[in-house]
Amino acid sequence: MIKEYPLLPLFEQFIRDSRKGRRLKPNGQRIKDQTIDNYDYVLKLLTEFSNATSFVLRIKVIAKLNKRELTAEKKYWNKFYSLFSSFLYKEKGCFDNYVGSVIKVIRTFFAYLNKDKLIMTGDFYKSFHKKEEEIEIITFLPEQLQFLINNKSFEESLSASLRYIKSITVIGCTVALRFSDLFNIRVRDIKLANGHYYLAVRSIKTDSATRVKLPVYATGILLQLAKGKKASVRIFRPVSMNSFNTNLRLLTEKAGWVQETGKRRTRNGQYNEIYKGDKKVEYRFCDLVSSHIMRRTAITTMLMLGMPENLVRKISGHTQNSKAFYRYVNFVQSYLDQEIDKVHSRLIEFTASTG
């Protein structure tokens, strides 16, 4: 008799084993809470999909299947992938990167069934393609970062809450930490050595240690915020990511960075122009900024100003062959190309006027 299991209870077991440490990373470390939260979202999507389409989600053990049954099983999973992807695109309005992240979790779940639970499902799941899209990198240019650091009249025009957001943004754009690591900085992480201040932290996501020398302006901000606090206390008081992003957009709007930039995303490999509201209003620069801009700005600024790539990676925590890191490198190259084009254009104008 062919063994068959309902899929959703197995997925719940996959989440429980991950949360309780019974399932670990290949290096033996526990799965991060944020990753497990993503598993919960995928379970919710699978449940919604099954209810909306009446598609029965089940797992069959393939050990005793004959050729005809294996072919039928392959068709079943091809149909699942097609219908589920369509559900994510059409019903949930997802874009390629999110669909790809969901499919990646499902592939991980099947690997868990085969390896950890010894439920031999076959490798049909390997044909579930993990789609990706290249989202345009939004960063502050060096002159914009200098404005946030040095323009005192602008700072004085801000409310106390926006001045606080600006302080966080300046530090984030300097030290290249992830959002979670930035808000985990404690007073004791500010180190004084040989007359210079350093920030020494350990990443929550990767558990890698980083030690960054602080410039004078960043030292001043951090020491002011740390004043009177115990060594174990966090420098920045908690701010939700949604609240931070809302205030950061307001901050950049007040700075006058309101140029229209547009917004494009891909669904199933096709580019779509995204607009604000029903009137198809173009997105402005200030509308698109988010917490990610801090780490991206720090990395691109270091690269733009000539720091070698291997040293930037050491600070940012990217591996040598990181695709994400080389997106920054390519972005910086395009920026340099634009600046060179300006120089060439001026040279041609100068030659024409003097010839």
Image (tube, helix red, strand yellow):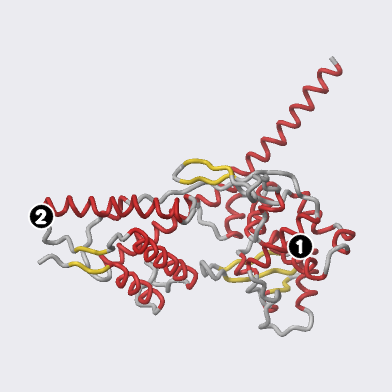
How many numbered discs? 2
Q: Nearer the viewer, residue 135 or 176?
A: 135
The residue drawn where x is 65% and y is 49% is 303
Q: Which numbered tag is attached to residue 66? A: 2
Q: Position of residue 78 (x, y in %)?
A: 28, 50
Q: Nearer the viewer, residue 258 or 279?
A: 279
- Does dot 2 land on a helix, a strand or a loop? loop
Q: Position of residue 164 (x, y in %)?
A: 77, 69
Of the residues shown, which amino acid type is indicated by label 1? Pro
The residue drawn where x is 85% and y is 62% is 155
The residue drawn where x is 49% and y is 51% is 95
Of the residues shown, which amino acid type is indicated by label 2? Asn
Mark 2 or 1 closer to N-term? 2
Q: Is residue 32 left or right of residue 315?
A: left
User: Residue at the top extreme?
Assistant: 355
Residue bearing mark 1: 215
Quarter holding the C terminus?
Answer: top right
Res 237 quadrant in image: bottom right
